[in-house]
Image: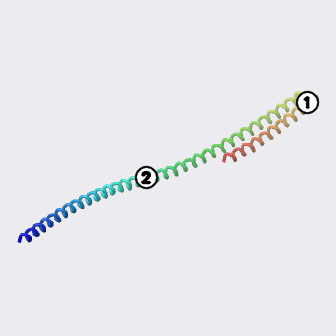
Amino acid sequence: KATMKRQASELLEAKEGLIRLHQVTLASKDAELSDALSRLNARDVEVRELEERLAREVNQRNTQREELKLRTEQQRLLQARLDSAQEEAQAHQESLQRREVLSKTQQAMQDGTAHRLLASNKERVEQTTELASLREEVERHRSVQAEAIVEAKQQRALVE
């Protein structure tokens, strides 16, 4: 009887020990699961934050891309306006040069005519020589003007 009691008592103690061990194991596993769940939740928060940051970055890059397109178009329009203004300035300059040459030519011709009318035969010969010299000068001016026009066009072509 005493042996049975002792064995029953040992069995009861072993059962209680197993129950305590089971409770400790369950508590430990619950703590581990709780920690894992906390880490998982923290990771989920990090992932959401990174996704939001990525979305903001993508939006910012798209905005920057559009701004760059607009700036490029604006630069193209400004270049077209600059080219047009340069062409107008060149045409105006060429017109002024032609007028100047024409004016000098007309003045030289008028001066020559006036001198011829007033001068004697000797003066007429000198004036004819002077007029020829002026015409050569006019031709030189025209030649210089033509060279300047060609050079301006070449410079403009280089700029383009």
Please identify the quarter of the rendering in which residue 28 is found. Answer: bottom left
Q: Please tell me which residue lies in front, 53 or 38.
A: 38
Left or right, residue 19 beside residue 143: left
Q: Position of residue 24 (x, y in %)?
A: 20, 60
Which of the two labelled residues, at mark 2 and mark 1, occupies the earlier sequence position?
2
Q: Please tell me which residue lies in front, 55 or 85.
A: 55
Q: Position of residue 99 (x, y in %)?
A: 74, 38
Q: Please tell me which residue lies in front, 68 or 43.
A: 43
The N terminus sits in image quarter:
bottom left
Give the vertical position of 105 relative to 79 (above or below): above
Q: Position of residue 33 (x, y in %)?
A: 26, 60
**Residue where numbered disc 1 is placed:** 126
Mark 2 secondary-structure assignment: helix
Q: CA distance from mark 2 to mark 1?
A: 86 Å
Left or right, residue 49 beside residue 138: left
**Residue where numbered disc 2 is placed:** 57
How many neighbours does mark 2 have within 10 angstroms: few (below 14), some (14-19), or many (20 or more)? Answer: few
Name the residue located 17 percent from the left edge and 62 percent from the top edge.
20
Give the vertical position of 146 relative to 69 (above or below): above
Give the vertical position of 70 relative to 142 (above or below): below
Q: Position of residue 139 (x, y in %)?
A: 83, 39
- Disc 2 residue type? Glu
- Disc 1 residue type? Glu
